[in-house]
Amino acid sequence: MNTQQISAVVRQVLAVVAVIMGALTQAVSNIHLPVAVSSVLAFVGGLILVVEHYVSDPSTGSTTPPASSTPAAPAGAESLPHA
């Protein structure tokens, strides 16, 4: 795995944790966070997951490496005699 893939996994895990914390703070009375904070946690976590899904989808995101800038050898160049 390269650094970009590891970063994507970390962001996804943090997003899921944010969504879970947003839901837990609304459902469990022992954890006291204001409703606005819980809503923001759930919204931002969901938003991060949507963006990560969009970026990782090959039909929408750019997961393929960019094309090499070095020009390719002309066809048949390897069969030319050397002088």
Image (cartoon, rainbow, N blue to C red):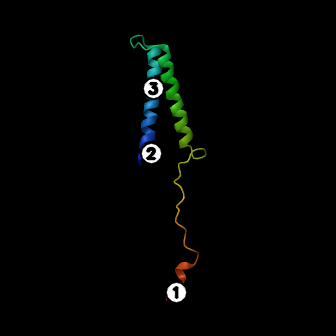
- First in sequence: mark 2 vs mark 3: 2
Secondary structure of the residue carrying numbered label 1: loop
Disc 3 packing (10 Å; few <14; some 14–19; many ≥20): many
- What residue would you read off at disc 1? 81
- Disc 1 marks a residue whose amino acid type is Pro
Residue at 53% x, 62% y is 69
Residue 38 on image: x %, y %? 47, 18
Secondary structure of the residue carrying numbered label 2: helix
- Disc 2 marks a residue whose amino acid type is Gln
CB atoms at circles 1 and 3 under 8 Å apart? no
Disc 1 packing (10 Å; few <14; some 14–19; many ≥20): few
- First in sequence: mark 1 vs mark 3: 3
Residue furthest out toward the left: 30
Residue at 53% x, 48% y is 63
CB atoms at circles 1 and 2 under 8 Å apart? no
Disc 2 packing (10 Å; few <14; some 14–19; many ≥20): few
- Disc 3 marks a residue whose amino acid type is Ala
- First in sequence: mark 1 vs mark 2: 2
Whether 62 is drawn above or below 44: the answer is below
Residue at 55% x, 48% y is 62
Whether 3 is drawn above or below 27: the answer is below
- What residue would you read off at disc 2? 4
Residue 11 on image: x %, y %? 45, 35
Residues 67 and 13: in front is 67
- What residue would you read off at disc 3? 18
How far apart marks 1 and 2 lie (CA) works out to: 45 Å
How far apart marks 2 and 3 lie (CA) works out to: 21 Å
Secondary structure of the residue carrying numbered label 3: helix
